[in-house]
Each structure stands twice: as structure tokens, then as C-alpha cells.
Amino acid sequence: MASTNDIRNGVVLNLDGQLWSVVEFQHVKPGKGGAFVRTKIKNVTSGKVVDKTFNAGAKVDFANVDRREMQYLYTDGDGYVFMDTSDYDQVTVSSEVVGDAANYMLENQNVTIALHDGTPLYVELPASVVLEVTYTEPGLQGDRSTGGTKPATVETGYQIQVPLFLETGTKVKVDTRTGDYLGRVN
């Protein structure tokens, strides 16, 4: 057990038997009354985000979450197979846990996997990844970067919106949080 003074972004709390990750926190000391900690927490399994307020100094239960660097190897019939880069153990993670991260993962790419008592909770990707455009409609003469956008399929099979001037075979940087096009990569 720890106190609310130890709450930081990214820590995982065990509340009523469920795991919640702290997205935002703020220590508040009003002019009147006692201090408190206002948090925005996200349910690790369902992804639901709620606001929760704790009294300052109250005891909270921190969950023991182990974040490990792992390499994505391949997709199995029922999940995704990752290899721990430190001891070469292989772990199969279900497609429900991987979620939208599958849209940005390439084979042999390193990701961070959060484990609680040996059970994978979620997959953490870098903020952006470089992917190759495998198909997009050809650009027309006069298409400029200030123009509109068009759909493009990247090498993972995911479809993103790119500027009109991009062609098939171009490597692009994609934001893994929003799926937005960030720019070309040479």
C-alpha cells in the first residue's frame, strides 16, 4: 500500500479488483478544506476512462506491472507471438490485448508489453513508426501538399489518409496514437 502522494502518470492502481492506469493526475490544495488528488484513470482491460478523486494521503494499492521490451515475431492463428529480448522466451498475446497496435506492427519490430502476474495487459508502441505505402491511387498533375488527402494502404494492411502527391512505394511516418500521416521518410 502506498499513499496518493506517490501517484504519477503511467502507474497502475488496483481498485476494487480491477487494474487502472493513471493517465493524468493533479494535486489540488484548495483555500478551504483538505487537499486532494484529482486523477483521470483508464481501465487496463476495457479501455474505459473515468475521473476519480482521492483524499490527500489516502492509501491506494499499486499493482505490480512489469514492462518488458519484446520483439514482434509473427501472427499465430489465435494471437501474436512476441519474444522477450532479454531471455528469448516467447509469449503469445491475444488479438484483443494487442488491439489497434496491430495496425502499426511489422515483424521484428520492438515494442513494450506490460505484464501483470505473467498476464499481458497491453502493447505499447513508439509514438511514431515508418511504414511503406503498398497501394494508393496515382497522383495527378497539379496535386500539391496543400491540397486534399487520399486513402493509402500501408504494408501492415492498414489504411491511412495521405497527401495527394504521394505514390506507391513511398515510406511514410505514421502517428501510432491517432493514425495520422506525419511526413515522408527518405
Image: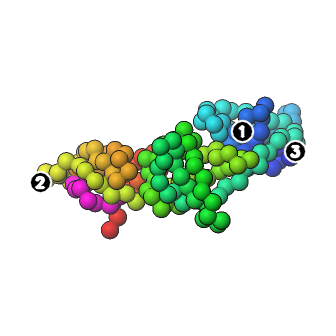
Mark-to-mark CA distance, 1 and 2: 53 Å
Residues at badges 1 and 2 in contact (C-beta under 8 Å)?
Answer: no
Magenta stretch bounds? 165-172
Residue type at mark 2?
Gln
Identified at 64% across, 44% down, the residue is 121
Badge 1 crowding class, 10 Å Cα cut-off, few under 14, some 14 to 19, many 20 or more, is many
Question: Is residue 61 part of the magenta span, yes or no?
Answer: no
Label 3 crowding class (10 Å Cα cut-off): few <14, some 14-19, many 20+?
few
Q: Main secondary structure of the magenta part?
A: loop
The disc, 1 or 3, on the residue closer to the chain's N-terminal end is 3
Q: SS class of the residue under badge 3?
A: loop
Nearest to the eye among marks 3 and 2: give it.
Answer: 3
Q: Amino acid at mark 1?
A: Leu
Which circle marks residue 141 in the picture?
Answer: 2
Q: Quadrant of the C terminus?
A: bottom left
Q: Three-letter amino acid code at disc 3? A: Met
Q: Could you tell me residue 108's position as x and y percent?
A: 48, 62
The foreground one among 156 and 165 is: 156
Which residue appears at 37% of the width and 45% of the height? 158
Residue 132 higher or lower than 122, as above or below: below
Q: Is residue 87 left or right of residue 163?
A: right
Image position, residue 30 (x, y; %): 80, 37
Specify whether residue 129 is in view: no
Is residue 97 positioned above or below 142 on the image?
above
**Residue position for label 1:** 19
Mark 2 secondary-structure assignment: loop
Query: Which mark is nearer the camera, 1 or 2?
Result: 1
Q: Left or right: 138 with respect to 53?
A: left
Q: Which mark is residue 1?
A: 3
